Image: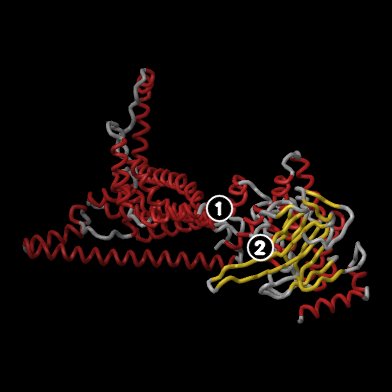
Amino acid sequence: MNTTQQSNEVYSENGIVYPSKVMLDLAKLKKVYPTPKGDYVVLEDLNLQILKEEFVTIIGHSGCGKTTMLSMIAGLNPISGGNISVLGNPVKGPGPDRGVIFQSPSLMPWMTALQNVLLGVNQVFPHATKGQRQDIAKYYLHKVGLEDAFHKKASELSQGMQQRVGIARAFAIKPKVLLLDEPFGMLDSLTRGELQDILIEIWNKEKITAVMITHDVDEAIFLADRVVMMTSGPKAKIGDILSIDFERPRTRKSVLENDDYYTYRKHLIDFLEH
Amino acid sequence: MEQEMVLKKEKSMSTNFKQILAKLTPSIKKDGIMKSLKNTGITLLSILLFLGLWHMGSKALYNKEADYKIEKALTERGEEAAAAERACIASGDSSCQPNTLPSPSQVWASLKSLVADHHVISADKAAFAEKMAATNEKMIAAGKDPIVYTGRASFIDIVLTSIKTVFAGFLLALLIAVPIGIIIGLSPSLRSAFNWFIQIFKPVSPVVWYLLVFMIVKTLYIGDSSDNAFVISFISVGFCAMWATLVNTAMGVASVDKDYINVAKVLKLGTFQKVFKVILPSSLPLIFTGLRITLSVAWMVLIAIELLAQSQGLGLFVWEEFQNGANDSNAKIIVAMFVIGIIGFLLDRLMLAVQNMVSFNKNEMA
């Protein structure tokens, strides 16, 4: 096993000893799509370790396999080779320990905002009382600023508000890992900024390990502890990793005023342009 | 003069009808009163034009038929007979009227006579029930079947029988097609297993369905003297009409947005929850589109099937009037035609309203 992250504390499960701080471990990950012209290798020999309570953003060119990687972590896409483990347990399929915020809000349009969040909450907390589950759902809807829209149908909400429900739904099931697939890609820049603030505010409180795909360099720096850059496909792998050493909690203003910001930005843009 | 009166009446009736329609159509955008007035005007004008053309057409056909009759009398029986025939036609005597496409006023008169006839029959029925009340009470007390009115059915009764049949058939189609559609929609292998069956039976004509149902029901009802025309006709209607719902339900269930399925997978919803909370609600709009087609098909094939099954509905009414060949038979057939058309239209509006109610994506609806 890859043990680059040395640690004195150890976490053991199923008799295997793991470095304690690692939440998500991708080892020699491979994805192959068979095509009539032969196999198309999307990802090959991809190694990445993500620590507990870490926020990682993934940046790379379109079609390099970022979404493929994320959906493999989510368990929605089968693994062709290598393995993925969460706290040492190999991923065998989708599950609520890995919450996903999709690019499109993917709410059930016939349900209200509250019902959409409850759909997950009911599943994850089957032994809680109805009132407790309602409270959890309402708490997170409140957190994303939708306290006035509990009973609005999802189809009546704007794209931005729908994605807020998406965020509430993902946090409300208390996942170990949060996977975000370009969640703000379809929004205008003003709404995007608002939602980034909401996301980071909840995250500061919950500290759920987060992996987020983005195309937006500024978003990547603002949100992340580390920015992972992926090489272009086919056979994409990790190209470079940039640690963002800004203190948390961050504000947009303090980040923009920091001189390192422009160094980070240049580093990322240089990577993407080559 | 009388003609004008009739036209006026029809005009006022059509405006009433439009008002009812406006109530049934939920989403008429208020682009200003002028526009809707203009639209109403155009509709009225087209109705008048239609009535005018119909009137002229029937007049021309009437004259042609009258000329032919006189000509025939002349060649076969001589001039005297021809003159008598001419006088007879001119006098309006029902024994020698040309039998052709009836004019709008004749149809209107027929409608009135059918309604009057309904009142007569209803009064008859009420009188009969009153007369039999005491006797029937005794018969029920003695454990026997009460004596029921077995006289001629009125036009309104006939229409009601047809509506009853079509709804029974529709319900049958719904109960068969929706569950099967869901099951085959969920499983690709069942879908391919059922596909040949659907493809082969979908285009089968209502007449053949009737014969098939007749073969089965006749055997099942052996020794039972009760009238099974109703049963045969509604089952045939159901079988004929259910295919659109079956195909649409299967398609709706099979083509649920992949995002919703992914959400269900991530949340690890059980099969029951997945079907009832995600798959079914998301395919409801397509299911209801199917049901709407099913209802309109059911109403369309009903006429043919009632005719074959000798069920006391509009189909049989039309056929009997045609066979009857009485002076106002043709006009009654046209009345039935309009009634069939209008009811079909109203049924479609009803389904559209239900469909709009269950559709969650309002802007996707046409």
What is the quadrant of the C terminus of chain A in the image? Answer: bottom right
Figure coloring: secondary structure
Determine whether, in the image, residue A259 is placed left or right of residue B46: right
What amino acid is found at the position of numbered circle 2 in the picture?
Answer: Gly
Report the residue at 55% width, 53% height from top.
B284
Indicate left or right for A103 with B356 as reference: right
Residue A270, position in %: x, y? 80, 80
Which residue was labeled with disc 1? B284
Can you give x and y, in whole percent of width and height, for residue A165 in the image? 74, 56
Q: Give, as a three-letter code, the residue at label 1.
A: Leu
The chain to which mark 1 is attached is B
Q: From the viewer's perspective, is B260 left or right of A11?
A: left
Given residues B264 and A19, the one toward you in this image is: A19
Question: In the figure, is residue B301 to the left or right of A36?
Answer: left
Residue count near mark 1 (Cα–Cα under 10 Å), binned few <14, some 14–19, many ≥20: some
Residue at the spot of label 2: A81
Identify the residue shown where x is 40% and y is 67%: B49
Using the rendered image of the protein, determine whether residue B275 is visible from the camera's viewpoint.
yes
Distance from the alpha carbon under mark 2 to that under mark 1: 40 Å
Q: Are marks 2 and 1 in contact (CB under 8 Å)?
A: no
Q: Position of residue B175 (x, y in %)?
A: 46, 44
Q: Answer above or below: position of A138 versus A229.
A: above
Q: Quadrant of residue B272?
A: top right
Of badges 2 and 1, the one in the foreground is 2
